[in-house]
Image (spheres, rainbow, N blue to C red):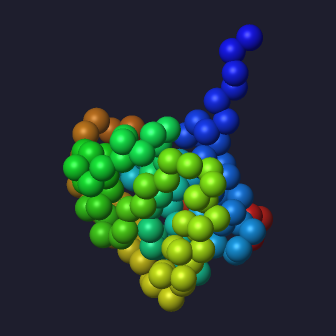
Amino acid sequence: MRAIATNSEANVQAEFYHQCRLIGLPVALEVSTPVGRLDVAVLNATGDGCVAIVECKKAACMISAELGQVRRYKKIGVPVYGLTDKQRCRGLAKTIQEKHAADPGVGFAAVLEMPRIGRPRRIPQQWRDNLNIKGCG
């Protein structure tokens, strides 16, 4: 039997979500935008804007400022953080909370008005619905 990969992108993403919830940092996973699907969108305090993006990858060499995916995400106008190790999740969550606690971020209405890059994946209304995270306080 083959060993189970515990440091897969999905597991890193899940651990980051968990650490954010523990410290009260609002996040949404797998958010579709006109520039691509964000692994993690860190939300502002009111939940109507994005203050940071976290891109999860299996290996550090897969995250680079020159990566087309990262370049597209930067067009939203918020910092893009890379995360490859479950052990760094708590530290990154706290860093983002400290740096961006009072940041209003970029409103979702402005993001939805951005021109779509690449092939269409989801309509903007679905993105709005994805961010309607009632009961996930």
Q: Residue at x 38, y 74 (%)?
A: 106
* Residue 24 or residue 121, whichever sits in front: 24
Count every numbered label the image shows and give the total: 0
| Residue 54 drawn at (x, y percent) | 47, 58
Say whether residue 135 is left or right of residue 7.
Answer: right
* Residue 29 or residue 12, whichever sits in front: 12
Say whether residue 53 is left or right of residue 11.
Answer: left
Kindly indicate the quadrant of the structure image that contains residue 27: bottom right
Q: From this view, report whether residue 19 is shown above or below residue 3.
A: below
| Residue 10 drawn at (x, y percent) | 60, 40
Q: In the orientation shown, which residue stands out farthest toward the top?
A: 1
Q: Residue at x 61, y 39 (%)?
A: 7
Q: Residue at x 60, y 74 (%)?
A: 94
Kindly indicate the quadrant of the structure image that contains residue 114: bottom left
Which quadrant, please, contains the C terminus? bottom right
| Residue 78 drawn at (x, y percent) | 36, 70
Which quadrant, please, contains the N terminus? top right
Q: Residue at x 30, y 50 (%)?
A: 64
Q: From this view, report whether residue 110 is shown above or below residue 66.
A: below
Does residue 32 appear in the picture of this structure? Answer: no
